[in-house]
C-alpha cells in the first residue's frame, strides 16, 4: 500500500509542506484532492477548487510541484488539473499543467534591469518577449469604451507592420486596460508569427537599460539590439517626459524601425499632444499612425468584466454584489480584479460565501475612492461608538432600550446614505426583515420632528461621516 498512487501523492504533499509556510500549504495545497493516476500514460489527475487556484499554482509553484512529483513518481509525469467550475451543479473541466498560450518563451535574461548581454552579438539571438501570457484578447472584454482600440489591436496583431495603424498609440487613465490590450497584441502576434521578434518593455525598464549601456559605453550596441525588433511594444512612455537623452535615443530606434515597416505600439496615460518635454519631431511620428483612447469602462462593462472573471475563477458572486463592486470601483479594471481576487481569497481561506458585507469590507481595503460611499459597517461603527454600545448587541434579539435605539438609528442612516433596499439593510443589521427597517426609519423620522436634542445627536453622527446631508 505504501507504493500506491495515492500514497505517492501524499508523499508529494509532505515534501511540499516542508518547503512552504503553514499558511501557504493550507491555502494552496491542502485543498488539492487526488483523483487518479494512469500508469500507462503516467498522468496524475488532481482536483482543485477553482480556476484561480490552478492559475496561482501554475504561476508560483510549478517548479516545486514538478520537483516533488519527480521525486515521488519518477521522471516524465504529466500533471492534469480537474478544476471545479460550478460547485452547486458539480461541473468541472480538466486542464493539463502547461502554459495556457502556446508560445515558446526563452528563459529570461538574468539581471533584466541591466543592458542585456545579447547586445554584444552581431546576429540577433533568441529573445524573451517579456509578455504576460495571461493578458489575451480572449479575456479582454469588449465594451463601448474600448471597441475601437480592441478592434485595431486585433488587426495589428494579425498583420503587424502592414497596416496604416503604425505606430499605434493608445492612451487612457490608469486601470482602463492599456497594458492588457498591448500585451494581448503581442501574445496574438507571437502565436501567429512565432519567428517574429516581439518585445514588450516598460518605459522605465528601457530607460534603466539605456543608462546602464551609457555606463558601460555600449550605447551603439543598445540601439542595434532594439533595431532588430519586429514588433516593439513600449508601455507608460509618459515617464520619459524629462528624459531628454532617452528620448533622443528612442527617436533613432523609432525612425529605423518605422522605415523598415516594423510595428511600433506605444501606451501612455495621456495623448501625444499632452506629453510635455517631448520634441516635436517625435510627437509628429507618434501621431502619424493611429491614436486611440481607452476610456474608463462604464458600469455595464465593469459588470461584464466581473462576470467573466467569476466564470474563469469558478467564483459564485451574487448579482447585487457584482452591481455594488461595479458601481464602486472607480471604473478601474485593476481595482475590479483586485476586489475579486480578495473576495476569492477570503472565500477559500475562511470557507465562506461571498455576500454584501464581505464585499463592503474588501472594497474599503482594496479601492481608493474619492467621495467613497458609506457602508453598513461604517455606519454601525460610528453609531455604536457614539452611543457606546457593542456591535454584537445590535445584532442580538435584545429589546433593551439602548440597543433598540442604536439599531433604529443605524437602519435610518443606512437607508439615507446607501443605495441598499430595506430588505438588504435588515439582513445586514441583525437579520431583520424589511418591515422592521421601515418601522425603524419612521420612528426616527417622527422623533427628529419633536426632539431637538436627538436631532443634534444625529447631526453629530452624520458630521463624523464627513458627508453633506
Image (spheres, rainbow, N blue to C red):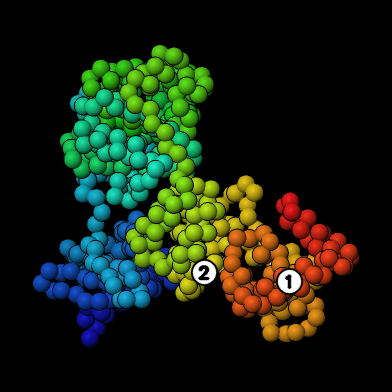
| Residue shown at 68% from the left, 82% from the top | 396
Q: To which residue does mark 1 refer?
A: 442
Res 176 quadrant in image: top left
Is residue 344 or residue 116 the one in the foreground?
A: 344
In the displayed orientation, state which residue is furthest to the top.
Answer: 281
Q: How far apart are marks 1 and 2 (CA)?
A: 27 Å
Q: Which of marks 1 and 2 is in front?
A: 1
- Viewport quadrant of the C terminus: bottom right
- Image check: 55 left or right of 259? right
| Residue shown at 28% from the left, 72% from the top | 91
Q: Residues within 10 Å of mark 1 (few under 14, many from 20)?
A: some
Regarding residue 87, the answer to whether it shows in the image is: yes
Image label count: 2
Lower position in the chain sequence, tag 1 or tag 2: 2
Position above or below: 274 against 467: above
- Image check: 233 left or right of 430? left
| Residue shown at 25% from the left, 17% from the top | 259
Question: The residue tagged with tag 2: helix, strand or loop?
Answer: loop
Question: The residue tagged with tag 1: helix, strand or loop?
Answer: helix
Regarding residue 70, the answer to whether it shows in the image is: no
Residue 22, position as x, y percentages in the image: 46, 70
Residue 47, position as x, y percentages in the image: 29, 72
Q: To which residue does mark 2 refer?
A: 355
- Image check: 201 left or right of 297? left
Is residue 292 or residue 268 the one in the foreground?
A: 292
Residue 92, position as x, y percentages in the image: 27, 70
Amino acid at each position: 500500500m505504501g507504493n500506491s498512487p495515492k500514497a505517492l501523492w501524499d508523499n508529494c504533499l509532505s515534501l511540499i509542506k516542508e518547503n512552504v509556510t503553514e499558511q501557504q500549504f493550507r491555502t494552496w495545497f491542502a485543498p488539492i484532492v487526488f483523483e487518479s493516476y494512469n500508469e500507462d500514460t503516467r498522468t496524475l489527475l488532481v482536483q482543485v477548487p477553482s480556476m484561480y487556484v490552478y492559475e496561482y499554482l501554475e504561476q508560483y509553484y510549478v517548479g516545486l510541484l514538478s520537483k516533488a512529483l519527480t521525486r515521488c513518481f519518477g521522471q516524465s509525469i504529466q500533471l492534469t488539473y480537474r478544476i471545479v467550475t460550478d460547485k452547486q451543479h458539480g461541473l468541472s473541466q480538466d486542464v493539463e499543467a502547461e502554459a495556457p498560450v502556446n508560445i515558446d518563451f526563452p528563459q529570461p535574461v538574468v539581471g533584466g534591469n541591466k543592458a542585456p548581454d545579447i547586445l554584444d552579438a552581431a546576429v540577433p539571438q533568441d529573445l524573451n518577449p517579456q509578455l504576460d501570457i495571461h493578458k489575451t484578447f480572449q479575456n479582454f472584454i469588449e465594451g463601448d469604451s474600448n471597441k475601437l482600440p480592441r478592434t485595431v489591436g486585433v488587426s495589428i496583431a494579425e498583420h503587424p507592420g502592414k497596416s496604416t495603424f503604425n505606430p499605434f498609440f493608445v492612451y487612457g487613465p490608469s486601470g482602463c486596460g492599456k497594458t492588457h490590450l498591448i500585451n494581448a497584441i503581442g501574445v496574438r502576434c507571437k502565436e501567429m508569427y512565432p519567428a517574429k521578434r516581439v518585445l514588450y518593455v516598460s518605459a522605465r525598464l528601457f530607460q534603466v537599460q539605456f543608462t546602464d549601456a551609457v555606463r558601460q559605453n555600449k550605447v551603439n550596441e543598445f540601439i542595434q539590439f532594439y533595431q532588430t525588433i519586429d514588433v516593439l511594444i513600449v508601455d507608460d512612455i509618459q515617464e520619459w517626459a524629462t528624459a531628454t537623452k532617452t528620448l533622443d535615443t528612442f527617436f533613432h530606434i523609432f525612425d529605423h524601425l518605422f522605415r523598415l515597416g516594423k510595428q511600433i505600439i506605444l501606451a501612455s496615460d495621456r495623448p501625444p499632444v499632452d506629453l510635455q518635454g517631448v520634441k516635436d519631431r517625435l510627437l509628429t511620428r507618434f501621431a502619424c499612425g493611429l491614436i486611440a483612447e481607452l476610456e474608463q469602462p462604464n458600469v455595464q462593462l465593469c459588470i461584464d468584466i466581473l462576470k467573466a472573471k467569476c466564470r474563469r475563477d469558478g467564483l459564485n458572486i451574487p448579482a447585487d454584489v457584482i452591481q455594488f463592486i461595479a458601481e464602486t470601483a472607480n471604473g478601474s479594471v485593476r481595482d475590479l480584479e483586485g476586489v475579486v481576487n480578495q473576495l476569492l481569497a477570503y472565500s477559500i481561506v475562511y470557507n465562506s460565501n461571498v455576500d454584501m458585507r464581505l464585499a463592503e469590507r474588501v472594497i474599503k481595503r482594496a479601492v481608493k475612492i474619492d467621495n467613497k460611499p458609506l457602508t453598513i459597517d461604517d455606519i454601525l461603527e460610528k453609531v455604536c461608538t457614539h452611543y457606546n454600545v457593542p456591535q454584537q448587541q445590535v445584532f442580538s434579539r435584545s429589546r433593551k432600550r439602548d440597543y433598540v435605539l442604536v439599531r433604529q438609528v443605524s437602519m435610518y442612516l443606512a437607508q439615507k446614505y446607501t443605495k441598499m433596499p430595506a430588505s438588504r439593510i435588515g439582513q445586514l443589521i441583525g437579520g431583520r426583515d424589511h418591515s422592521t427597517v421601515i418601522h425603524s426609519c419612521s420612528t426616527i423620522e417622527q422623533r427628529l420632528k419633536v426632539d431637538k436634542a436627538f436631532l443634534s445627536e444625529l447631526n453629530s453622527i452624520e458630521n463624523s461621516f464627513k458627508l453633506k446631508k
